[in-house]
Amino acid sequence: MDTEMLERIRTANKIVALTGAGVSAESDVPTFRDAQTGLWASFNPQELATPEAFQRNPRRVWDWYAYRREKVLSVSPNPGHMALVEMEKRVAPASVPAGRDAGTTHSSFTLITQNVDGLHQRAGSQNVIELHGNISRVKCSIDDLLVAEWQTDADGLARCPRCNGLLRPDVVWFGEMLPRSALEASFAASENASVFFSIGTSSVVHPAASLPMLALARGGIVIEINPEETALTESATYSLRGKSGEILPELVQTVWGR
Ligand code: BJW
């Protein structure tokens, strides 16, 4: 690995990692733009993840998410997720004594994910900003009420206990606003990042795809980790070609040791 890059990571006081579906690929969760398998092979995920698709055919969209929710529950975090847990511990140690170095800036690590699978939290990451929601949660499509338990009716759909509206996954579909607090925290962290990792994302979906540009504009470096070239590659300071489950553990080991 490039020694200058390693030194920038070692001396960085603000590190941001933005993750996408590729981080969960080695846990056997299909990436978003991968061909769908089995029952869903003939559907384009980009056409299912929209409010219009849900309006047209709520049963199809509900069933697609139910299938994916089951899948996510049946898998485990992989070495890429675990390396990010380790990075969080190394960059922002939990045991900074109160009052120490008052007035100075401490190192910080921010993990921003586009993934809805909750695998970072299951791996043990403490502070995860979920930009696109979480597939395990369900909310009312009319009044946004979060519903912890639900049962499907004879038509295969579930309804809101308060207004009888159709329930839907608590994820962000195309054309919908991202959760405001998650977005604001992501912008703030990215603007201040001295090192910004973009990991396992095709970098085509906005506003997530614009976050590394904020880091670059303020003099930060951007390190992409992906087996393929992406829309970000041309702008990235460094591109590490390979799987996140292989590159991340090696990188953490090289920078911070045991
Ligand atoms: C590996 C690997 C391994 C494989 N290791 N890597 C500005 C410009 C243009 C358009 C817009 C814009 N601003 C807004 C828009 C519109 C739209 C958008 O971005 N469209 C683009 C497609 C052009 N954005 C929105 O609508 C957003 N809303 C919004 O901005 O509101 C305001 C607004 C509305 C309308 C107009 C203007 C403003 C909302 C976006 C919501 C995205 N939601 C989804 C679905 C979530 C629920 C679900 O999962 O079903 O989020 S779409 C989907 O894409 C999902 C993902 O989080 C997201 C990103 O995908 P990701 O993670 O990058 O996955 P892939 O599959 O694309 O890539 C995987 C990568 O992994 C690949 O590169 C592989 O090579 C790699 N890989 N194995 C490492 N082992």
Image (cartoon, rainbow, N blue to C red):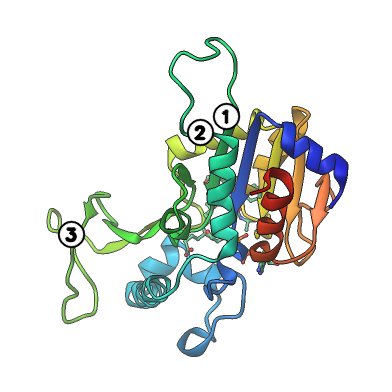
Q: Nearer the viewer, mark 1 or mark 3?
A: 1
Graded by Cα atoms within 10 Å as few (under 14), some (14 to 19) or many (20 or more), the crowding at tag 2 reads: some
Query: Could you tell me residue 149's position as x and y percent?
Result: 18, 63
Secondary structure at badge 3 equals: loop
In the figure, is residue 30 to the left or right of 136?
right
Dot 2 amino acid type = Ala
Q: Are marks 1 and 2 in contact (CB under 8 Å)?
A: yes
Q: Rounded to the nearest whole Å, what is the CA distance between mark 1 and mark 3?
A: 35 Å
Res 188 label: 1
Outermost residue to the top: 103
Query: Could you tell me residue 235's position as x and y percent?
Result: 82, 46
Q: Rounded to the nearest whole Å, what is the CA distance between mark 2 and mark 3?
A: 30 Å
Q: Residue at x 59, y 71 (%)?
A: 26
Secondary structure at badge 1 equals: helix
Dot 3 amino acid type = Cys
Could you say which is closer to the camera, residue 120 or residue 174?
Answer: 120
Q: Residue at x 46, y 13 (%)?
A: 99
